[in-house]
Image (cartoon, rainbow, N blue to C red):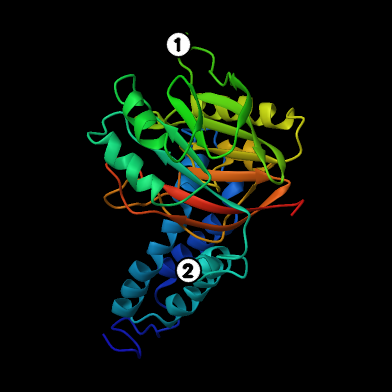
Amino acid sequence: MRWGKDAKGRSSWARGCVLASLAVLTSGLQAFHAAVPDTVGNVGSLLEAFLPWLGLAVPVLLLLAVLRRSATALVALLLPVAVWAHLFGGMLFPGDGDGGAHDITAVQHNVSDENSHPAGTAEALIDGGSELIALEELTPSALPLYEKALAPVYPHHAVEGTVGLWSKYPLTDVRLLDIRPRGIGEGWNRGLRAGARTPWGEVAVYVAHLPSVRVRPTGFDSRYRDESAELLGEAVAAEKLDQVILLGDFNGTLDDRGLAPLTSRMESSARRFAFSWPEVFPVSRIDHIMTRAATVTDFRTLPATHSDHLPVVAGIRFATS
């Protein structure tokens, strides 16, 4: 087949309508993902969990359009390319604020409850030089090892259940944060709140680990995660201190509507992909650092430790500085 008429007499503009329709559909799913309902199998949330990867449809459709010799499909592909570039193109390059001046840095890391080398993980995090470190999936056997390794650099720390916060600044008013969804038994403690006395005033620091999501035969199951996110959002909204830092493994991306109780109340860095999970081939950023009355000036991943997540680090500038 040539770029002229095919055996049926159709020109390159007359064939490839199905491919062109798929290109338009891809554009619509990217641009209007919030309109995709969650009524059946939470397909909207599942789409948003991997939204940037929808761009992979473009090279596939491009190859098919070339093989089909369809000018219509090739022109239609400009639409998903433009939409993807608008939504995510800026993440490929450092933005104006990335790497900018900051007052402190904070690290967020799910260290994995199967981590075989807690001391090595702690040393790797210390090398980052951050003022705050939030950890999740702390086990009773590994916790003393983290405490011993981090204590010389981070003299202040707080642990509630399986989450912990290590700080170079004194911590006050430490308390358990109840984000346990209905249906999960007692003893499930994955949240804490503490005040950090910084040179820029007292800052409320929240550490949380939201429930995991599952892809089941019935669809994308995020019920527990969404309920826990709502409880966490309410707690942050009720916080009396103006300056807030929220760190955690939220088992969802910034595009995921299930995290709207957090993303609608807090500022987060959407300028870089910084995929943090899984460690072997990261495809999603589910580890987050968010702020209120402060600005995230930089966000990136750190080298792998012995966890199935990559650590993430953020530069933070306070409004009072």
Tell me the quadrant of the picture where the N terminus can be found.
bottom left
Number of residues whose C-alpha sits closer than 10 Å to that of mark 2, classed few (under 14), some (14–19) or many (20 or more): few
Q: Residue at x 42, y 30 (%)?
A: 212
What residue type is disc 1 on? Gly
Which of pointers 1 and 2 indicates the residue nearer the eye? 1
Q: Of the residues under marks 1 and 2, which one precedes in the sequence?
A: 2
Residue 219: horizontal and vertical position, in percent? 41, 32
Q: Is residue 308 visible?
A: no
Question: Which is more toward the observer, 113 or 48?
Answer: 113
Question: Which is more toward the observer, 228 or 32?
Answer: 228
Residue that label 1 marks: 187
Q: Residue at x 48, y 18 (%)?
A: 189
Residue 299: horizontal and vertical position, in percent? 52, 56
Q: Is residue 125 left or right of residue 241?
A: left
Are dots 1 and 2 in contact, CB under 8 Å?
no
Q: Secondary structure at mark 2?
A: helix
Q: Is residue 169 left or right of residue 253?
A: right
Q: Is residue 9 visible?
A: yes
Question: Which is more toward the observer, 198 or 79?
Answer: 198
Q: Is residue 95 above or below residue 282?
A: below
Number of residues whose C-alpha sits closer than 10 Å to that of mark 1, classed few (under 14), some (14–19) or many (20 or more): few
What residue type is disc 2 on? Leu
Q: Is residue 210 above or below residue 181?
A: below
Residue 118: horizontal and vertical position, in percent? 29, 34
Residue that label 2 marks: 92
Q: Residue furthest top?
A: 186
Q: Residue at x 63, y 43 (%)?
A: 263
Name which quarter of the figure residue 123 lies in. top left
Name which quarter of the figure residue 69 lies in. bottom left
Q: Residue furthest front?
A: 152
